Amino acid sequence: MIKVVVIGGGPGGNRAASRAASLGAHVTLVERDIVGGAAHLWDCIPSKAMIATAGALNFSRRMGGLGFSPATRPREIDYEALRDRIGVVSSRLQSSVEELLTSQGVRILRCEARLAGPHTVVVGAEDGSQEELEADAIVVATGSRPRVPDWASPDGERVLTTRQAYPPPELPEHLVVVGSGVTGVEFVHMFSSIGSKVSLIVSRQHVLPHKDAEVAAALEDELLRRGVQLFKGARAQSVERSSDGIAVHCDDGRTVRGSHVLLAVGSVPNSDRLGLENAGAQVDKWGYVTVNHHCQTSVPHIYAAGDVSGKLPLSSVASMQGRKIAEHIMGLHTREHRHIDYDKAASAVFTEPEIADVGLAEAEAFAGGRKIRVTKVPFGSSARALINDDSRGFVKIISDPATGVVLGGCIVGSQASELISVIALAVTVGLKVTDVVESCLVHPSLAEALADAAE
């Protein structure tokens, strides 16, 4: 029986453990924090739970358009109830992951782990005891942690990392968010929705610098409508804490003051202290474990999945990597096998309106001199959007003008994270715009805008 040791129980690690066990491997999963993933259950799930609550409150503010009187609409959030709800959601997900793994015979160890050699993992318990695990294959899926710039010292009170803000100890009166990527704008959305004044420091000239420019503009318009202050072209250099607030000093001389500051400036891979050098596995200058298209490291029987692999930092990608790794370990790659195409991975930004995209981006195509066909339909022409009294946003589909094959697309609007699945499927399997147009979709539905955009 093949022995597999998985270090890290996040989406990549637990999927690798589960799939390998289902294929007949003897699997040991080592996790020092939360089975299910600290980043997943401390970051992703709590943030989306908070966003769901914020979305419900925002919806209540629009209920007048659906025929409700102001007296029937909720006005504020019970902060303690929100905190309890986040804990319940995370606990249930953690329990479900553990129950599945246990039912499959996976041995779960809650401790630290490090590689002592190419086939040896040493695990240590809190009492100081150690155990050596011999493995035919090792999977490193240790995730990442919030990056802390050298000019800031998080205290968990007024100077917060992302992991200290789900939710923070108290509702910020005025939150200053440093970082305008996906994580940053999600925080801006959730806290501006639940009642905080919010300022966003944008180091570039628009938010979401790696997204479609029209998408970024649509989100900026919504943020400005809510009263969010955008400090564009400013790069934070220092943060000063006083008895009743903070001041963030920027490189252009501006100072942004508030009650709290949130650092959303990226992440750092958890590859240190793993003993990778003892096994000969290479890491790059940023600390990411170098992998090939099979997620193998420089040592073929040692694999890496999730954030630590340096690929797309998405839970969905980590989970797919874990599955592919398990199948490669168990020899399934010798049959029909499809490598992960990271360029075709769908992603979403859970702001309001939601943002989602997949595949080739318009700017990327133009930069490369590639001919494309771009079609765009606003949700203002959607019957379902009008029924829902929320016609913000649009659908944009990018296709090959010669063949009609769908190459990519983006969506801004309600349920974009769900709707993008249709375009993602089209991109993954090479469907043509005519395949989308000729699908008889439900009426009235938001999905009809996808067919309209493809036409």
Image: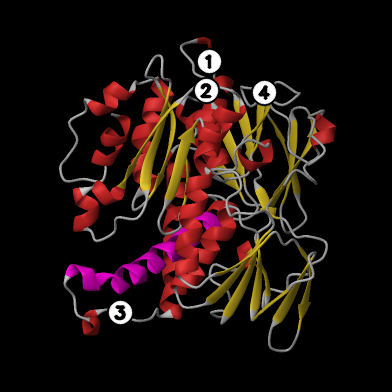
* Closer-to-camera residue (175/406): 406
Gap in angstroms between the C-alphas marked 3 and 4: 52 Å
Q: Where is residue 210 drawn, in percent x and y?
A: 60, 44
In the picture, the disc for residue 139 is none
Name the residue tied to disc 2: 327
Gap in angstroms between the C-alphas marked 4 and 1: 14 Å
Residue 426 seen in this snapshot: yes
Name the residue tied to disc 3: 74
Q: Where is residue 163 drawn, in percent x and y?
A: 62, 63
Look at the numbered disc 1 and give the secondary structure of its residue. Answer: helix
410 above or below 61?
A: above
Quarter of the image that includes the N terminus: top right
Gap in angstroms between the C-alphas marked 2 and 3: 50 Å
What span is colored magenta in the figure?
41-66
* Closer-to-camera residue (363/124): 363
418 above or below 323?
A: below
